[in-house]
Image (tube, grey):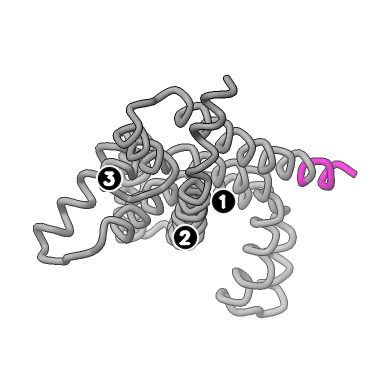
Amino acid sequence: MKEAFNLVIPYYPLFLKGIGYTLEVSVLAILLAVCIGTILTVLRMGKNSLPHRILQNIIAIYISFVRGTPILVQIYIIFQAFSVLGLNLSAFTSGVIALSLNSGGFMAEILRGGFSAIPKGHIEAAKAIGMPSHKIWTRIILPQVFRIAAPQLTSEFINVIKVSPMLSVLAVVELTRTAERLVKVTGEAIPFYITIAIIYFIICCLLEELVKWQEHRRTV
């Protein structure tokens, strides 16, 4: 055990860099996912016209696709799609987009749940005083939705961190890719994979404590 620990220690700068990439990818992806989820939530609410029903069906198919297919397959599809379109995006950018599109589908469902929990009287009162639709969304609906859904949004952030190792297939040098490189250099696997497992565990535990704190605040 001591020998394994001594083997890992000299490479701690690389692990710190890998942590930075992991958090950077995850934070950017979750921010884009929140934007995607918010847009989808707004588009799903509206008049029951034929064009709107068609739009709702398209959004439903998108959400079903990202929730019902492996994230690894989605990463490959996004990366190859950009190549076919002639867009030479970096692996980092492609990875962030792939994670955000995946998480955006989950975000849309989380935010829809938050929307359904808003008292209808709040929206009706805003309409009664003549408040424009965009102000109803920005001042009445969305602030309450994000407050209600905060624990679930944090949980989704944890999920994004957990699936971020999939980006190693695109050679994005996050924690898992860092460990893979060190395994090739040293010929030792277990110490490095145990190290990144512990790092992921600590990060996720801290975020899970944040979820518990948010839920405690809601119940107090």
Q: Nearer the viewer, residue 25 or 137?
A: 25
Q: Quadrant of residue 66?
A: top left
Earlier in the chain: of badge 3 and badge 2, it is 2
Disc 3 marks which amino acid?
Answer: Ile
The residue wearing badge 3 is: 75
Q: Amino acid at mark 1?
A: Leu
- Of mark 1 and mark 3, the one earlier in the sequence is 3
Q: Residues within 10 Å of mark 3 (few under 14, many from 20)?
A: many
Q: Is residue 107 placed above or below 159 in the rendered structure?
A: below
Magenta range is 214-220
User: How many numbered circles are shown?
Assistant: 3
For the point 49% across and 46% down, which residue is it? 15
**x and y, in percent, of residue 174 in the image:** 41, 47
Q: Which mark is in front, 1 or 3?
A: 3
Left of 114 or right of it: where is 186? left
**In this orientation, which residue lies closer to the viewer: 45 or 101?**
101
| Position of residue 121 measured from the top left corner of the image (x, y, whole percent) | 74, 59
Numbered disc in front, either 1 or 2: 2
**The N terminus appears in which quarter of the rendering?**
top right
Please tell me how crowded label 2 is: few (under 14), some (14-19), or many (20+) other residues with Cα within 10 Å.
some
Name the residue beneath numbered marker 1. 111
Instruction: Specify whether residue 148 is in view.
Output: yes
| Nearer-the-camera pick, 159 or 34 | 159
User: Mark 1 touching mark 2, by CB under 8 A?
Assistant: no
Main secondary structure along the magenta-highlighted residues: helix
